Amino acid sequence: MRTILAWSGGKDSTATAILARQYGITLDDIVTVMPDPFQCELDFVKRFEAWMGQAVTVLPGPSFDDYFWARKVRGPHKGTIYGWPFTVFRACARRMKWEPMQRWAKAQGEHTFLLGIAKGEARNILAPNESLLVRFGLTETDARNLCEQHGLLNPMYAHFRRGGCVRCPKQGREALRKVAELEPEKWAWMVRHDADSPVTFKPGKTLVQYMSNAKVRVSE
């Protein structure tokens, strides 16, 4: 049975990789999905690969642009683009992350996923999948400390409270200001195509309206 690390780049899945190396657990593959990554995340992937001595498989799947411009094929809004993802649903995560992972997993034969779930988290782990953090008793705080000890804490933690896509509408104003700073080209794309979306960036507010009082450029 193959052992595969489902790696998000976050502290828990990275700590799982560190534990696997420390305890001599062979990882037959390290897989991730990156539909709309920050440049600092891409740089971190290279650093992580160098430390592990093993490549990360970035699974193919719809990018954020693919999702935004995709046209609905059924329902009352058939033919319109999806545009901004709804903030109250996770359809975007399902299409861009979960479904590509599931398609890939089905082609792998018998396998065990090592999941980045820390001790004390209220999340189920379905056999044969496993969490090394649970096995070795590491909490989320322990996982972060382990990453810091090995110089493998994702640089995203220096900027954001939560990970996610660059253009995710769930971000607040402070995070979006940081997006504009770190990813000016993607930020310009967001402003340029804000009016193209049939779904407002936030409930009842376009991106431009939402950021109108923020100290960030919202016009071309």
Image (spheres, grey):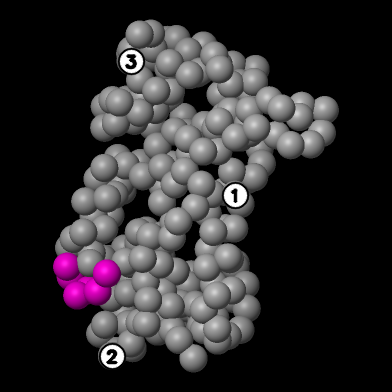
Location of residue 27 (image quadrant): bottom left
Specify the amino acid type for callout 1. Arg
Q: Residues within 10 Å of mark 3 (few under 14, many from 20)?
A: some
Specify the amino acid type for callout 2. Gly
Disc on res. 108? none
Comparing marks 1 and 2, which lies closer to the viewer?
A: 1
Comparing marks 3 and 1, which lies closer to the viewer?
A: 1
Placement of 6 over or under 135, stated as above or below: above
In the structure shown, which secondary structural element does the residue marked by tag 3 occupy?
Answer: loop
Cα distance in 3D space between marks 2 and 3: 48 Å
Specify the amino acid type for callout 3. Val
In the structure shown, which secondary structural element does the residue marked by tag 1 occupy?
Answer: helix
**Which residue lies under the disc numbered 1?**
95
**Which residue lies under the disc numbered 3?**
216
Name which of mark 1 and mark 2 comes first in the sequence.
Answer: 2
Whole-percent x, y for residue 33 in the image: 44, 56
In the structure shown, which secondary structural element does the residue marked by tag 2 occupy?
Answer: loop
User: Is 117 one of the magenta-colored residues?
Assistant: no
**Which residue lies under the disc numbered 2?**
24
Give the magenta range. 50-55
Q: Is residue 198 visible?
A: yes
Placement of 162 over or under 33, stated as above or below: above
